[in-house]
Amino acid sequence: MQGEHSASKMDSPLTDAQIQKINEIAKLPPEKQQAELNSFLKTLNAEQIEFLKSQQGNGGKGGSCPFCNIAQGKIPSKVIFEDNEIMAVLDINPATKGHAIVFPKEHFETTSQMPDKMAGKIFTLANKISKKAIDAVKAEGTNIIASNGVIAGQSLGHAMIHVIPRFKDDGLSFLWQGKRGDDKELEKLQKDMKGITLDEDVVKPQQPIEIDDEDFDDMIP
């Protein structure tokens, strides 16, 4: 397993700094992206602009999606797990030390769009990373978070799971104030939301996913 991907100059005329800038722009809110992108494009030469155009409209796998570019090795990343379907990398802007992101190599906008078997695999890996992070960074707990849709806090259009180690007084809060639900409304929702089935491949025991201890060296100062 590679510990780090590197941008290939054979594949891209963009510099590492330019690729990093594209990654940063992609993380901006939609209302800010266009202005930043216009300014950035003015700094590129004709070859670089043509390369970016060729990457657009490629099933979401072009320059507009940083996680597709990570999967293709076009953006450097600290990889802690990788196989032919999914990856886990350390977040370059971590909420806390050891913050990792798990995502499919194939482009899906939300976790709900993924096949059940792949979703099960990704959540299994997230649990494995959670256990490993507790040992690697001496975390006191973890949050495993999937945000689907902008209104739910999803900032990039690629399905992913965040594994965030938690520490006392780390300043993060994912709490909400619940309100007592109306019994009749709950009964209606219960009827409307029943009928979910799981694929046989999901409910049967899966092969264990192994993560080597050295993969977490970057988490430890």
Image (cartoon, grey):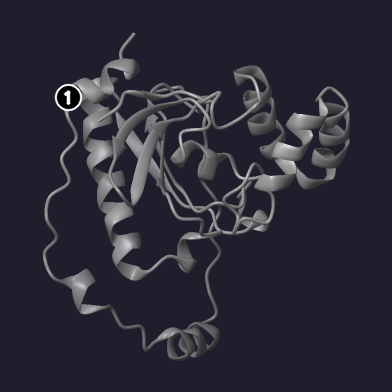
Q: Nearer the viewer, residue 185 or 109?
A: 109
Q: Position of residue 134 (x, y in %)?
A: 25, 28
Report the amino acid beneath label 1.
Asp
Q: Position of residue 87 (x, y in %)?
A: 36, 42
Q: Position of residue 187 (x, y in %)?
A: 46, 88
In the picture provided, is 201 more to the left or to the right than 169? left
- Label 1: which residue? 213
Q: Residue at x 29, y 66 (%)?
A: 117
Q: State the residue lying farthest toward the top.
A: 221
* Quarter of the image with the N terminus in it: top left
Q: Is residue 7 above or below residue 117?
A: above
Give the secondary structure at mark 1.
Answer: helix
Q: Is residue 35 above or below residue 137?
A: below
Q: Quadrant of residue 34?
A: top right
Q: Nearer the viewer, residue 116 or 164?
A: 116
Q: Residue at x 59, y 59 (%)?
A: 59
Q: Can residue 164 be seen here?
A: no
Q: Is residue 187 above or below residue 164?
A: below
Neighbourhood count class around disc 1 (C-alpha, 10 Å): few under 14, some 14–19, many 20 upward = few
Q: Quadrant of residue 219?
A: top left
In the picture provided, is 179 more to the left or to the right than 220? right
Q: Residue at x 29, y 61 (%)?
A: 120
Q: Residue at x 65, y 18 (%)?
A: 17
Number of marks: 1
